[in-house]
């Protein structure tokens, strides 16, 4: 048995490092699959060309009021799809959106006032109006947290090219969702302007927003 393992301390250390590296890589890959941030490049292409992102939807906000895309006409939108039970990526991303708007408000209040942050659930079964109202309090005060029937959510997600599905783990007492995790910037005309991938610094988001809105 001894012969199968490296003999020197250095070799053993190298083996340990290699294992840690492999596990780390596997973890990153798993995480990317779980939140599907990896296909951003194809979206960037799609946004500039043939594939339409955004479109009509009808959902319900955290006050129980029905909203459609028409309610946001003339405004810049930061649109993020996720779910309130998400353990990591969604709260991080919504916090980044909120911080970006805070930064922009300090720098250029007029530009910030033109932006509405929107969170749309991909888990309408659990994300009731009340659940969304509670969750929204953790983020930007102007955040609109939208839910709806499973069909309404599916239609909104289809319009924004968002993939989502329950993870298949029958042993889990509660389910997780796989879902795309882009923050879309939509223009006042309802057209796609840009998007931010997971991990974009709030500072960078704020800069892009300011440039797009004020041209400065
Ligand atoms: Ni998530």
Image: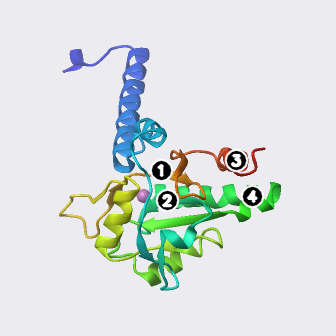
The span from disc 3 to disc 4 (Cα, nearest Å) is: 15 Å
Disc 4 target residue: 111
For disc 3, the marked residue is: 203
Closer to the eye: label 3 or 1 = 1
| Residue count near mark 2 (Cα–Cα under 10 Å), binned few <14, some 14–19, many ≥20 | many
Q: Is mark 2 within 8 Å of ligand 1?
A: no
Q: Could you give the CA–CA distance between mark 3 and mark 2, rounded to whole angstroms?
A: 18 Å
Report whether the residue tagged 4 is closer than 8 Å to ligand 1: no
Query: Sequence order check: which comes first, mark 3 or mark 1?
Result: 1
Position of 200 compared to 40: left or right? Answer: right
Q: What residue appears at the point 38 percent right and 76 percent down from the top-left corner?
A: 148
Q: Which circle's residue, 1 or 4, is located before the other in the chain? A: 4
Report whether 152 appears left or right of 92: left
Label annotation for residue 80: 2
For label 3, the SS is helix
Compared with residue 75, is residue 4 higher up or lower down, i.e. above or below?
A: above
Where residue 25 sits: x, y (%)? Answer: 39, 33
**Residue at the disc numbered 1:** 182
Question: Is 2 placed left or right of 40 in the picture?
Answer: left
Q: CA distance from mark 3 to mark 1?
A: 17 Å
Residue 110: numbered disc = none
Q: Position of residue 139 (x, y in %)?
A: 61, 68
- Element assignment for label 1: loop
**Marks 2 and 1 in Cβ contact (< 8 Å):** yes
Quadrant (top left, top right, bottom left, bottom right) of the C terminus? top right
Residue at left 59%, top 55%?
Answer: 187
Q: Disc 4 and disc 2: Cα gap in Å?
A: 20 Å
């Amino acid at each position: 048995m001894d012969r199968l393992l490296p003999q020197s301390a250095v070799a053993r250390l190298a083996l340990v490092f290699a294992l840690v590296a492999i596990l780390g890589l596997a973890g990153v890959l798993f995480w990317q699959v779980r939140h599907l941030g990896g296909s951003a490049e194809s979206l960037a292409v799609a946004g500039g060309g043939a594939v339409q992102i955004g479109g009509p939807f009808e959902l319900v906000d955290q006050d129980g009021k029905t909203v459609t895309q028409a309610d946001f006409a003339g405004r810049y939108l930061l649109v993020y799809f996720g779910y309130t039970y998400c353990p990591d990526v969604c709260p991080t991303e919504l916090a980044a959106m909120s911080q970006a708007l805070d930064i922009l408000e300090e720098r250029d209040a007029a530009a910030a006032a033109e932006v509405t942050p929107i969170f749309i659930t991909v888990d309408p079964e659990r994300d009731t109006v009340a659940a969304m109202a509670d969750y929204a309090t953790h983020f930007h005060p102007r955040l609109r947290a939208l839910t709806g029937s499973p069909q309404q959510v599916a239609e909104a997600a289809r319009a924004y090219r968002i993939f989502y599905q329950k993870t298949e783990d029958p042993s889990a007492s509660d389910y997780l969702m796989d879902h795309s995790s882009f923050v879309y910037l939509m223009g006042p005309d309802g057209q796609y302007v840009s998007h931010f991938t997971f991990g974009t610094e709030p500072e960078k988001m704020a800069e892009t927003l300011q440039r797009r809105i004020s041209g400065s």
